[in-house]
Image (cartoon, helix red, strand yellow):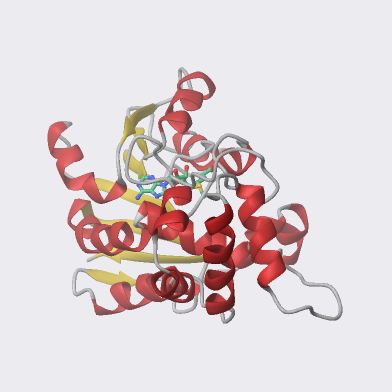
Amino acid sequence: MARPEIGTDLVDGTLGGGGHTRALAERVTPDGYVIALDRDPAALAAAELNLARMAVKLVESNYCELPELLEQMSVEAVDGVLLDLGLSSDQLADESRGFSFNSAGPLDLRFNPNEGEPAARLVNRLKAEALADLIYQYADERHSRRIARRIVERRREKPIETASELAGIVGAAMPKRRGRDTIHPATRTFQALRIAVNDELKSLEIGLKRIPDCLKPGGKLAVISFHSLEDRRVKESFRDDARLEVLTRKPLRPTDEEMAKNPRSRSARLRVAMRK
Ligand SMILES: C[S@@+](CC[C@H](N)C(=O)[O-])C[C@H]1O[C@@H](n2cnc3c(N)ncnc32)[C@H](O)[C@@H]1O
């Protein structure tokens, strides 16, 4: 049985590896299309090949600039917008960008390597206190002070350049624990630095304010978030927005089967709201 169509004009605000864009493009009306955005030029280059001949328009952009983009494209409003926040599996696998802890590549962590400051510059530049505040604020890392102190000690010997160097320094700064950790000891520190260099929470806050005006009445905004800093912003913004009706009283979580197949989905939360 054919799956029901879900709209004419849809936006995937976070193209990544293109999985969601493809699934959406398969379900637009025959004259419809998906506008797919990403800040990362590499994601767009891959999609040019992988999604060729599909009903997809690719644009390098931050999703918080969607109103200007639709105006340029003479699109008044769309039926749905999807945001799947954070980093993609392709970014994680790319040794040259430093997203993965054991990568010998430069500690960069930017979604768009042409914008802003690489994470290595940040960890070599900030004073210990500012570094600790950042790691605490963006990742709730309770050992942030020890980690920042250790980073500052080590960079006096030589600047920190690679992801694996930083992961080693953070690991050594952590108190020894009995039993096995479920996550790598540097997970939170990397998350905090990534959020900072990409100014991710600012994009999310601006996007949540602006995107509802891009929706047709009945149009939906769906957001998948991966940590509480994001999820709290989505929940409160949906709840307090007079333009929106919340469709998910509680966020949707992946099933056990999905988590077993895709362990990175374990912390995902999906919330959906509809334009009144
Ligand atoms: C979790 S991945 C998306 C995966 C995608 N749904 C898929 O099916 O492969 C998130 C993507 O969003 C991009 N991104 C993050 N923040 C963005 C923003 N503010 N605007 C546009 N793209 C963003 C990242 O570069 C990354 O490629």
14 and 218: which is toward the camera:
14
How far across and how far down the image is residue 67, in percent? Answer: 17, 46
Report the residue at 46% width, 51% height from top: 119
Q: Position of residue 192 (x, y in %)?
A: 48, 64
Left or right relative to 271: residue 90: right
**Which quadrant is home to the N terminus?**
top right
Q: Considering only vertical position in the picture, is 88 above or below 201? A: above
Question: Which image quadrant for residue 32?
Answer: top left
Front residue of this view, candidates 62 and 30: 62
The mark tally for this picture is 0
| Residue sitting at x 35%, y 66% | 273
Q: Is residue 197 above or below residue 189?
A: above
Q: Which residue is outermost to the right?
A: 179
Q: Position of residue 158 (x, y in %)?
A: 56, 50
Looking at the image, residue 140 lies above or below residue 209: below
- Residue 141 in sight from this viewpoint: no
Point out residue 170 in the picture as x, y percentages from the top left corner: 64, 65
Quadrant containing the C terminus is bottom left
Q: Quadrant of residue 268?
A: bottom right
Q: Is residue 153 left or right of residue 134?
A: right
User: Is residue 64 or residue 26 the one in the foreground?
Assistant: 64
Look at 58% across and 54% down and name the residue there.
157
Residue 60 seen in the current view: yes
Q: Residue furthest front?
A: 157
Relative horizontal placement of residue 141, taking residue 73 as reference (left or right): right
Left or right: 260 in relation to 12: right
Q: Residue at x 49, y 78 (%)?
A: 250
